[in-house]
Every structure is written in C-alpha cells, then in structure tokens.
C-alpha cells in the first residue's frame, strides 16, 4: 500500500508539472503571437506612413484610401490590426495573411526597406490601381514573401526590370503585373529580360492566372502546355511577342481566358477545338495569326468574348460561329489585313447571336444594304459598321428599336442617312455616334437631347455655317471627342473663343472654312487638329500649358506672329505641325529636356536664325522639316546622333559652309530621306556621310505601305498619323499626302558643291529611289556604279560640269522614270533600250557632244552601237540578242516604269 500511495502521489505531481508546463507553453505561444501581431501591426502602420494619399491616382470610381482608417487602439499595446480595412488574418495563428490595398489612392515608392516585407506570412497581396512612382519591383518579393499564392501589382506604375526572384514564388496561383505604364519623361516600361518568360512560367507550376499585358517582353512564347496544366487565364496583350504561338496552349484543359492581342509580329493559327474546351474569352486582335478559321469554333459554346480584328485569317468565315449563342462581344474589324476583308455580303450568322452586346465589323468591304436582322439584336450596346461598302438609304429611326444602344458607328460607307426632325424622343441615349460621310446637310436635331454623348463624328458631310450653340450646350458636361472634318463650317455660334467642353480630349476640325483666332481648348486636350482652315492671328501662350497635349496640328492656315518660346516644352507632345503659315521670328527652344516628339514640321514659314540645339534631346524624333524658311546656319551635324530620325528636310534656307566628317560611323542610323537643296553648301559632296547612311543601302522589306507615326493611346484609341510631305523630284514638285514607306531620297541640288561624284559611296545606296545632284559645280565622269541602284526612279544630274560618256549600264535601271543630264559637258552616244527609249530630247540638251537615236546629232557608225562596251558594263548571257529583241525589251521596261511611278503615288 505504501508503494501504491507513493506512486499515486508521484503521478499527481508529474501531472501537475505537465499541466504547469502546458499552461506556460500556451501562455508563451499567446504572448509570442501577440508580440508577432503587434510587430505586424507596427509594420502595417509604417507601411501606411510610407505613402501619400492622392485620390486622383486610382482609376476605379469606387476607389478610396483604405489605410486612412488604420489606427492604434487603447494604449497602443493591444492593437488588433486584423479588423483593419483590407487586412486579413489567419484565425489560428493570428498572422496577417492577406492584404488588399487595390484602388487605395496610394502614391509613393516601394523600396527594399519597406516594412511590407516584414509580413512574411502573407499569402494574398493586392496593390493594384495605385501609383508607385515608377519605382522598381523589389527583389524582396521573391525572398521574403515566399508564401504568396496571389500577387497583383497591376496598373500601379511600377517600372524597370521585373526581378528574377519573382520566379521563386512557386506557390503562386495568380500573378498580375499588367499595364504598368505611363508616358512621362523618366518612366521606363516594366520589362522582362529576354528569356526570362520561359524561366518564369517553368517555375510557376501552380499558376492559374498569368497576366503580363503591357510588359515589354520581346521574346517568343514558350510552350507551357506541360508545366501549366492548371492554367485558366493567360493575358499577354501589348508585350512585343514574336515567333509562332504554341498551339498546345489552346488545348490546355482548363483555359478560359487567352489574350495575346496587339503583338503584331506574333504568328499562329487556331487548332481544331472540341466540345470539352471551356474558353470564355479568346483574343488575338492585331497579331499576324493566319490560316482558315476552323469550323470547330462552333464547339466553344461557353465563349463570351471573341476578338480577331486586324489579323490575316482567310476571309471565309465559317457559319458555325452562329452556334456561339453565349457570345456577347464579337470584334472582327479589318478581319483580313492582307486582302482588306473581302467578306462580301453581311455575315448571316450574326442574326443567331442574340446575346451580342458589342459588334464590330468595321473595315471589311462588306457591301449591300444594312440588314434589318440587325435591329432584332435587342441586347446590342455598341455597333460599328464603319469603313465598309454599305449602300442605300438608312432611316435612322430604325435604330430606336435597339433600346440599349450606347454606341453607333456608320462612317465611311456609301450610305445616305435620313434623320427625322421629331426623332429625339424615341432614340436611346447614345455615348458614341459616328456618321461621317453619310450625306448629312445639317447638325441632326436629335442631338439637342443627347446629354450623355461623349464622342461625335460628323466628318465628311455637307454641313454649312457655324456650329450651333444648342449643340455645345447639350453636350457641355460629357463630350470628350469631336470630329467635324471636311465640312463647310465657319466657326462656333456665339462663342468667344473658349471651347465649352471641360472634358474634351480630341478636337479634329481640319479642312473646313473656320476663321478668326484659334479656339482655346480645355486642359484635358490631347489631340488638337485644325489644319486646312482660315484661322488667323497668333498662337496663344496658353497652348504651352496643356500638359496632356500629344498632337498639335495647325498647318495650312493664315496664322502669323512669333511662336511662343514655351511651345514644344511638353514631355508628352508627339506631333508639332505648323507648316504653311506666316510665322516669323526665331524658333523656340524645342525639347529643352527629353520629350516624346516624333514629328516637327515648321516648313513654309518665315522663321529665322539657327536650328535650336535642344533638338538633340528629341530622342524619339522621326521627322524634322524646316523647308522654305529664312534660317541661316552651318550643317547641323549633331542631328546625326538622333537614333530614330528618318526624314530630314532643310530645303530652301540659308544653310551654308562645308559639310564636314561625321563624328562617328553611326550617325543618322535610320535616315531614309534627306533634302538639303537650295541652300549655300559648298566644298566636296559629303562622301563620308554617304558611306555610313546604312538605311539607304537596302530596300526595307517592312510590309507597311506608308510612313506613319504611331502615337500612344489618344482619347481611348490608338492614333496613327500619316505624314504629308512636299519634295522636288522627277522634274516637278511632288506632294505626298501620305509618304510612301519605301521612299528613299537624297536631294543636294542647287548648292555650290564641287568635285567628283564619289563612285563607291553613291553606288552602295541601293535603296535610293530619287537622287538629285543638279545645279551644282560637279565635275568628272558620271559613276558607272549608279547602274547598281536598282530601285532608282529619278536621277537628276543637270546643270553641272560633268564630262565623259553616260554609262551604258544605266539602261538596266528598269524603274527609272525620270532622267536629266542636261547642261553639262557630256559626250558620246546615249544609252538605248528599256527606260532610255522613253526619255525626251530635253533630258540631254546643253551637251553638244552627245549623239544618239533620239537626238538631233546622230552618232557615227563607230559610236552608234546600242550594246555597251564590255569595259563599261558586264555582258550577260542574253545580251547578244539585244538588237533582235529590241521592242520586246523596251515595251516591258516602259510599262513597268510607268506602273511603278503611278503606284508609288508621285503624280
């Protein structure tokens, strides 16, 4: 019994000790958790203090500063931050595991010292829709927050390189870094180093949603069909992707969203889809996807969004698309970018898509009347049929059947729109209306009651007189985009020169009869285009204060006076076009710091002085045109450092002196057009420059037809500007409304250059289309290397002191449409055959030593051979048949030259 009693007491003591130890442990755990929570609360409060609150930086209309409500309670030692707005804690451990600060109006930088990285238990982090001041994403995201399963840093203005450490977050199921970009002086778009996309996706084996739209990736797309079987959403719009898109990604079993739009160099095709596919959103717009649209598209019964605009798919559209009865968004504008659509009749399957809310079939050459079946799509909110071949009379009241309609675009067809005066009561409230080139003769009266209108396009009609006061009264609070181009408007009715729309971003009034001083836009303006009017007076200094202005187009008016010295200071201005006015005085200091300017055209004015050296800061400059002014300066060789400069025109000024040597071998790396004609340059031709103008040495294989400057998003749409240009060529003044992309020219005419034409440097410029060295003091022979310029269409060497023979191999220039060597000291026979049988006598006048079939002076027998001597041009295997086949050669040469000349659009 004693032993049992002792043993019982021993067990009791042990039990008590165990209970004591357990209680102590629990107390320590609770204390540790409390201390940990206090540390996390302190970290959150310090996180709050690291940012300013700016309600304008978040775009969500429901945004509010969540951190404003974070405060300590009591004595500061018992804070419970788990109750704070946007903070989520684990119920067991008490640690902060979720932080949702999306759309919280935060402004400031995040660096590696930020207390955010003390929250090491975080699993979900949302910092989207804020402004982090273009700071880089710290690598500590990958080091310290290794438990993250959800990371959203989208639309928050991070910049620079995405750290490779992000790929270490192997537990991530959602990664969203999209749309971190804004055009300012010192911002660098968010980038992913070439090759890192592959390592990123290979490590994220649990990824479900990968959103990198707007990130500069510039790589091929790795095949992730093996490592990303859980993927449900892949969004890679605007990433600079190229190569072929892996078809296996389309066949991943769980993918619901796949968007790779706006990657123009990305190729690919659609595979055969089966009924097990669960796609809801599929977008490949503005890519180089091609091939036949598969009939199996009809198997995607869950598809809600389908966007294939501006691709190269075969124009035959399968009727099975009519099976997509859940489709609410269908975008097929510019559907076949190569053949420009050729869809022919209106696609009948559209009438089956009764859930459609958005339908864009613009720019597809669809012909015939607008089908009445469209008016049965009762859910339509947006309809665009612009830039097709629709014809006939449209009774506008038909659209009153579409009660939900908010946007309607019918511009650029062959329609006549009839609008009843009593229509306004039955029409829905529109936000977008485009009736350009619809044969309207007056402002539609129903606009009086369209108080929600944000965008209006009435361009290309026959509207006369002033813009009525009732129109700008009705739209005062809402209108942001107004296009009234190509009408007969004279001004604003009863307006004192201040535009009444406080939210206006786009104003396009070109080619009217507008008079008086320039109307002053609001601060919101981004595009201001009033060229081809009758405006007078000076440019108000107020134009310097428009910090959002990207395009200022004032050309072809009667504006005068001195230019404001602050003009061109804006960091976002991309196009500054003031040509064909009466401006005088000195040129303002353009680009005092780095800017976005792509086009600067001050030609055909009366400006004086030197070219501002600040132009060197215009690192995005593609066009610089100061032709026909009164400037006086030496050749601005420092322009050669501009990496993007493609067109340089300084014609008809007082530039003078010897053009020296380039500073490096990399000057003017992209120059295609240079016109220095009608100045006072002297000395030898600038052979050192001719040797390094490498972009002129080949024919650019770019598919673009015209030279364009693409702006960033302007007023909600991407703006593309064609460049109009006037040059001298082919013996006449050539006016290009749209400059051909392949046009490459050198015009050094009407100067005081002397010496010989350099044989090698000129002969290497094989992309040249026009070469004009006329009206100088050049001596020596015409280089035979000019015969290597296979793309040459115009060659003018007139009014010089050239001697010797015309090289016979010039006859092999089959595109040569204009040739002039008049008023030199040339001698011997003129070449015969191909294009040379089309040139008239005035091409050779003033050369008493020349003889030939088409000249008054005939060649003697020893000189008259149509075959060039072997020493001048290399014989080919067919040359022995030249005489016998003379007309078989001449006629195709003449025809091809004429066709090319017309197609390029020179006449």
Image (spheres, helix red, strand yellow):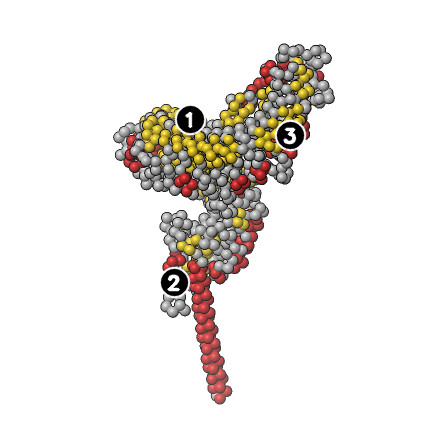
Q: Which residue is mark 1?
A: 389
Q: Residue at x 33, y 26 (%)?
A: 464
Q: Residue at left 48%, top 38%?
A: 588
Label 3's element? strand
Q: Earlier in the sequence, mark 1 or mark 3?
A: 1
**Mark 2 Cα shell of 10 Å, populated few (<14), some (14-19), many (≥20):** some
Asked whether the viewer can see residue 502, the reply is yes
Tag of residue 684: 3
> From the viewer's perspective, is the residue at label 1 or at label 3 nearer?
3
Badge number at residue 798: none
Q: Position of residue 830 (x, y in %)?
A: 65, 16
Tell me, yes or no, whether the two marked residues, 1 and 3, touch with CB atoms within 8 Å.
no
Q: How many marks?
A: 3
* Nearest to N terminus: mark 2 or mark 1: 2
Under circle 2, the secondary element is: loop
Whether pointer 2 and pointer 1 mark residues with C-beta atoms closer than 8 Å, the reply is no
Residue 291 in view of the camera? no
Where is mark 2, residue-wise?
71
Residue 295 position in % (x across, y down) = 48, 34
Helix, strand or loop at label 1? It is strand
Residue at 51% in and 51% down: 207
Is tag 3's residue or tag 2's residue first in the polypeptide sequence? 2
Q: CA distance from mark 2 to mark 1?
A: 64 Å
**Foreground: disc 2 or disc 1:** 2
Location of residue 405 by image quarter: top left
Q: Estimate how packed mark 1 is, as few (under 14), some (14 to 19) or many (20 or more) residues with alpha carbons within 10 Å.
A: many
Q: Residue at x 34, y 36 (%)?
A: 497
Measured Cα–Cα span from mark 1 to mark 3: 56 Å
- Label 3 and label 2: CA atoms lie apart by 77 Å
């Amino acid at each position: 019994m004693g032993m049992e009693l002792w043993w019982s007491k021993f067990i009791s003591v042990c039990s008590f000790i165990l209970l004591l130890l357990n209680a102590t442990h629990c107390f320590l755990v609770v204390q540790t958790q409390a201390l940990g929570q206090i540390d996390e609360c302190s970290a959150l409060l310090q996180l709050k203090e690291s940012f300013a609150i700016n309600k304008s930086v978040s775009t969500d209309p429901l945004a509010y500063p969540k951190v404003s409500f974070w405060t300590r309670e009591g004595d500061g030692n018992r804070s419970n931050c788990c109750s704070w707005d946007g903070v989520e804690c684990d119920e067991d451990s008490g640690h902060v595991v979720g932080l949702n600060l999306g759309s919280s109006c935060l402004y400031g930088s995040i660096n590696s010292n930020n207390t955010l990285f003390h929250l090491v238990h975080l699993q979900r982090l949302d910092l989207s829709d804020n402004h982090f001041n273009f700071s880089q994403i710290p690598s500590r995201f990958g080091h310290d927050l290794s438990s993250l399963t959800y990371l959203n840093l989208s639309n928050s203005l991070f910049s620079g390189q995405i750290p490779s450490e992000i790929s270490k977050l192997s537990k991530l199921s959602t990664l969203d870094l999209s749309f971190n970009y804004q055009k300012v002086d010192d911002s660098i778009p968010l980038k992913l180093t070439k090759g890192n996309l592959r390592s990123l996706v290979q490590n994220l084996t649990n990824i479900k949603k990968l959103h990198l739209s707007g990130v500069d990736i510039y790589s091929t797309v790795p095949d992730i069909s093996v490592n990303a079987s859980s993927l449900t959403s892949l969004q890679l719009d605007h990433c600079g992707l190229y190569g072929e898109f892996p078809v296996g990604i389309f066949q991943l079993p769980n993918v619901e969203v796949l968007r790779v739009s706006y990657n123009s160099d990305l190729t690919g095709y659609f595979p055969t889809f089966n009924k097990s596919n669960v796609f809801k959103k599929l977008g490949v717009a503005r890519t180089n996807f091609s091939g036949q649209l598969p009939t199996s598209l009809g198997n995607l019964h869950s598809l809600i969004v389908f966007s294939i605009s501006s691709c190269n798919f075969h124009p035959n559209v399968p009727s099975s698309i009519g099976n997509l009865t859940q489709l609410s968004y269908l975008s097929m504008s510019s559907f076949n970018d190569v053949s420009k659509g050729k869809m022919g009749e209106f696609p009948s399957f559209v009438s089956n898509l009764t859930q459609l809310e958005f339908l864009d079939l613009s720019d597809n050459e669809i012909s015939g009347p607008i089908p009445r079946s469209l008016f049965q799509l009762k859910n339509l909110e947006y309809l665009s049929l612009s830039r097709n071949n629709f014809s006939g009379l449209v009774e506008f009241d038909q659209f009153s059947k579409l009660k939900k309609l908010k946007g309607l675009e019918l511009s650029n067809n062959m329609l006549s729109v009839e609008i009843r005066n009593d229509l306004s009561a039955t029409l829905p409230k529109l936000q977008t209306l485009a009736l350009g080139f619809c044969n309207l003769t007056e402002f539609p009266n129903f606009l009086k009651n369209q108080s929600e209108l944000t965008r209006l396009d009435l361009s290309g009609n026959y509207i006369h007189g002033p813009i009525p006061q009732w129109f700008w009264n009705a739209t005062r609070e809402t209108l942001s985009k107004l296009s009234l181009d190509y009408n007969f408007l004279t001004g604003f009715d009863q307006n004192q020169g201040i535009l009444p729309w406080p939210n206006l971003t786009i104003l396009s009034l070109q080619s009217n009869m507008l008079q008086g001083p320039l109307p002053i836009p609001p601060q919101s303006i981004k595009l201001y285009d009033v060229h081809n009017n009758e405006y007078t007076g000076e440019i108000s200094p107020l134009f310097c204060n428009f910090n959002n202005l990207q395009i200022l187009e004032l050309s072809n008016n009667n504006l005068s006076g001195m230019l404001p010295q602050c003009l061109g200071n804006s960091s976002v201005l991309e196009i500054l076009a003031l040509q064909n006015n009466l401006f005088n005085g000195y040129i303002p200091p353009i680009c005092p710091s780095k800017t976005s300017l792509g086009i600067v055209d001050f030609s055909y004015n009366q400006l004086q002085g030197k070219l501002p050296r600040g132009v060197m800061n215009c690192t995005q400059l593609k066009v610089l045109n100061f032709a026909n002014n009164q400037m006086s300066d030496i050749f601005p060789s420092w322009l050669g450092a501009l990496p993007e400069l493609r067109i340089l025109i300084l014609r008809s000024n007082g530039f003078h002196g010897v053009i020296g040597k380039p500073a490096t071998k990399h000057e003017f790396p992209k120059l295609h057009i240079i016109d220095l004609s009608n100045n006072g340059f002297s000395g030898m031709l600038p052979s050192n420059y001719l040797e390094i103008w490498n972009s002129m040495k080949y024919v650019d294989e770019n598919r673009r037809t015209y030279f364009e400057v693409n702006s960033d998003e302007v007023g909600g749409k991407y703006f593309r500007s064609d460049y109009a240009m006037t040059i001298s060529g082919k013996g006449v003044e050539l006016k290009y409304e749209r400059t051909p992309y392949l046009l490459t020219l050198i015009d050094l005419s009407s100067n005081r250059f002397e010496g010989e034409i350099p044989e090698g440097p000129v002969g290497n410029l094989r992309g040249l289309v026009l070469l004009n060295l006329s009206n100088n003091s050049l001596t020596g022979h015409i280089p035979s290397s000019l015969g290597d310029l296979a793309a040459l269409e115009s060659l003018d060497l007139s009014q010089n002191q050239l001697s010797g023979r015309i090289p016979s191999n010039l006859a092999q220039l089959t595109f040569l449409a204009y040739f002039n060597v008049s008023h030199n000291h040339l001698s011997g026979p003129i070449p015969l055959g191909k294009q040379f049988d089309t040139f008239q006598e005035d091409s050779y006048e003033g050369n008493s030593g020349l003889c030939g079939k088409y000249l008054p002076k005939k060649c003697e027998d020893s000189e008259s051979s149509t075959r060039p001597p072997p020493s001048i041009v290399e014989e080919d295997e067919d040359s022995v048949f030249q005489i016998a086949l003379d007309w078989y050669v001449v006629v195709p040469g003449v025809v091809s030259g004429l066709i090319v000349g017309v197609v390029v659009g020179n006449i």
